[in-house]
Amino acid sequence: MIQFFHVHKSYQGQPALTDVSLTVDKAEFVFLTGPSGAGKTTLLELIFCAERAQKGQILVNGRNVARIRASAVPYLRRNIGVVFQDFKLLPSATVFDNVALALHVLGRPRREIRRKVGEILAAVGLEHKVDSPPARLSGGEQQRVALARALVNDPAILLADEPTGNLDPERTDEIMALLAKVNTRGATVMVATHDRNLLTRWHRRVLTLDRGRLMTGASPPEDPAGAITEMETFPSSRPGRGSR
């Protein structure tokens, strides 16, 4: 489902990822861990084309995102749910509208949108906040809205950047159980986390990054014939930033 072949990413000469090769199978649940600045967020961003690598190839659901046209990126993202570390909620929209946005973009019927948004908000314990703007929510509640938005479209791939970082232990267990349920339904799940307790309690494969290098948990894939060529160099959209 996700394959990296000798991927390099840097920002103004500062390496964020160095020679990363890995394979995440369809319907696999994987933790991505490592210290702050290890490159976890950068790796996730490369998967959904928020950033481009300077070298290497990345295959996502059979598509080579190194060569994908900008006009095709929105179609790729329709099958990827993302929980951002900083949430990225629309401040002027209600909880309902934030979660429903992806379904509106896909042109789903209003009745289906109401049903699916109601179901996913109930699953994250926020059905009573449906009409609230994000500013009236706690950090943990905003995080759950971001998770609901990522899940509402039943994505084939779910990428979550510290999805339990602002939650208490009880709510963390609830969210992790929800992610596990999504995984059992066939979604490929990758969770970036600093929380060592999650790695201990939820027995899944762990990918460990340290200063941009993958240390453990990866089985480097074989290079597909003719696929591994040096990529065009793309300028960073955020100059001056170090590895993340």
Image: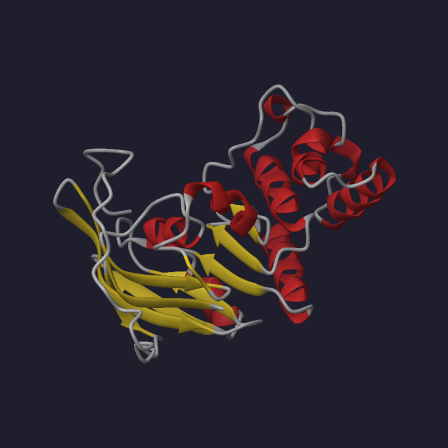
Choose between 95 and 101: the one closer to the eye: 101
Residue 54: x %, y % from top left: 22, 52
Left or right of residue 168, residue 209 in this image: left
Residue 221: x %, y % from top left: 34, 78
Left or right of residue 194, residue 29 in this image: right
- Figure colour scheme: secondary structure
Residue 190: x %, y % from top left: 48, 61
Res 211 → quadrant: bottom left
Residue 109: x %, y % from top left: 82, 39
Q: Residue furthest left?
A: 13
Choose between 172 and 53: the one closer to the eye: 53
Q: Relative to residue 224, is residue 137 depicted above or below?
A: above
Q: Residue at x 76, y 26 (%)?
A: 131
Q: Residue at x 29, y 62 (%)?
A: 209
Res 2 → quadrant: bottom left
Q: Relative to residue 144, is residue 220 depicted above or below?
A: below
Q: Residue at x 61, y 65 (%)?
A: 187
Left or right of residue 212, residue 125 in this image: right
Left or right of residue 177, residue 216 in this image: left
